[in-house]
Image (cartoon, rainbow, N blue to C red):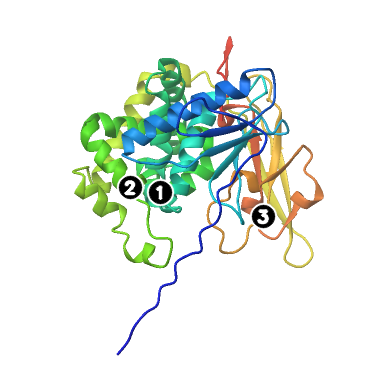
Amino acid sequence: MAFTVIEARKPKPPYKLAHAVRSEGGPAVAVGDAGPEGVAQQLANAISIDLARMQAFLGLHDTPALTALPDDALDGDAFQRAVLPNADGVVVRAAFTSDSFDREGFRAYALASWMEWYSHGRAAEESRRWLLDGTAQWLVARDLPQQQDKLALRAAFAARLLQARGRGAERAVHAWLSVREELGPCLADALAWRMVASLAQQMGEPRFRVLSRSVLAERPPGDARASLLDPGFAALLAQAGAPGQARLTRQFDALFKAEQARMAGTLDRIAVPQVRFSAQRMAGNTFEVHYRTGPAAGEVPPFSVLYRTPGPWDGEIAPEALSGSTAPAPACCRRRSRAAPACSPRWSGATRCSAAVPGWRHSAGR
């Protein structure tokens, strides 16, 4: 006779921030008190309203508190989520006292972080991550026409970049983590928003809500049963009456082409500085990576180099795991064990959602 013992994880105490401004309504949101009077309170109330809408849309109950911490060392469009080894909950941080703070981008990031935490990371698996990223953006932007216009332009630009490399909607549907690394979170989030908004319109909100709940709002067991009981994303699409992944690929391809055609005049005026990399073998298994910026329409915007030593089995590299410096790159960046992914440019241009267009400058964002 064979039997199996599955041991449940020991629950951790919830994270609590002692000195914080708390939302005036529920769900509870705690924000570190910083900046001018009222800034933290406004942010706490806004995220609390977002969580309440998400809770109603996904049919959740008793959502735990979310904590947001200030960090003036971050850029206004850079957000991070804490890893809590001895506590439980969602703790995010941003430079919300900065003049360049991307408020709507951070609100969507907070929702996506919460859904990833609630699903024990299942919602962030590659096959369904685009739905997670896009739904968070969609929930925040639903009542914000200007935010929708901003996301639409970014999404069209992202689609143009993908298709220029021969990687259209098929990559977005089947290899989303690679797409996120290529585009950066800002453009990838916008592209995911476009995909989700199109799918929600096609399915109708009631059926799209059923799909979202099955993918994003199911909290799996906190033990080994989680992987055994997962039906898979393809099965969840079929159960909700959504198009299969092959059909989604065709529909998104048509959508991307239509959006690029609609915004062709604006997209053609966006100048993208060129950057070239070359690697030279050094002693042992290390390489020296050289980079050079090429000509662009107008002045090349300032940029920094992000670098990290990836392990052989690393998946997506989290943005907060990257170190950065202004050019020239430091020795720790020039000499890496793997040259290709070790150095990547961080633009203040299009890939960081501040596209250089003659006569105006697209508003910066995450």
The residue positioned 66% from the left and 55% from the top of the image is 339
Q: Secondary structure at mark 3?
A: helix
Task: Determine whether, in the image, residue 182 is placed left or right of residue 211.
Answer: right
Q: Which mark is residue 215?
A: 2
Name the amino acid type tagged 2.
Val
Of label 3 and label 1, which has the lower sequence position? Answer: 1
Q: Residues within 10 Å of mark 1 (few under 14, many from 20)?
A: many
Return the residue nearer the eye: 218 or 252: 218
Q: Nearer the viewer, mark 3 or mark 2?
A: 2
Question: CB under 8 Å between callouts 2 and 1?
Answer: yes
Name the amino acid type tagged 3.
Ala
Q: CA distance from mark 3 to mark 1?
A: 31 Å
Q: Residue furthest bottom?
A: 1
For the N terminus, the image quarter is: bottom left
Query: Vertically, is 88 above or below 305?
Result: below
For the C terminus, the image quarter is: top right
Q: Nearer the viewer, mark 3 or mark 1?
A: 1
Return the residue nearer the eye: 1 or 301: 1
Query: Vertically, is 227 above or below 305?
Result: below
Q: Total marks drawn?
A: 3
Q: Residues within 10 Å of mark 3 (few under 14, many from 20)?
A: many
Query: Vertically, is 243 above or below 354?
Result: below
| Residue 134 in the image, given as x and y percentages of width and height | 40, 36
The residue positioned 54% from the left and 21% from the top of the image is 270
Residue named by callout 3: 339
Question: CB under 8 Å between callouts 3 and 1?
Answer: no
The image quadrant that residue 323 belongs to is: top right
Return the residue nearer the eye: 12 or 348: 12
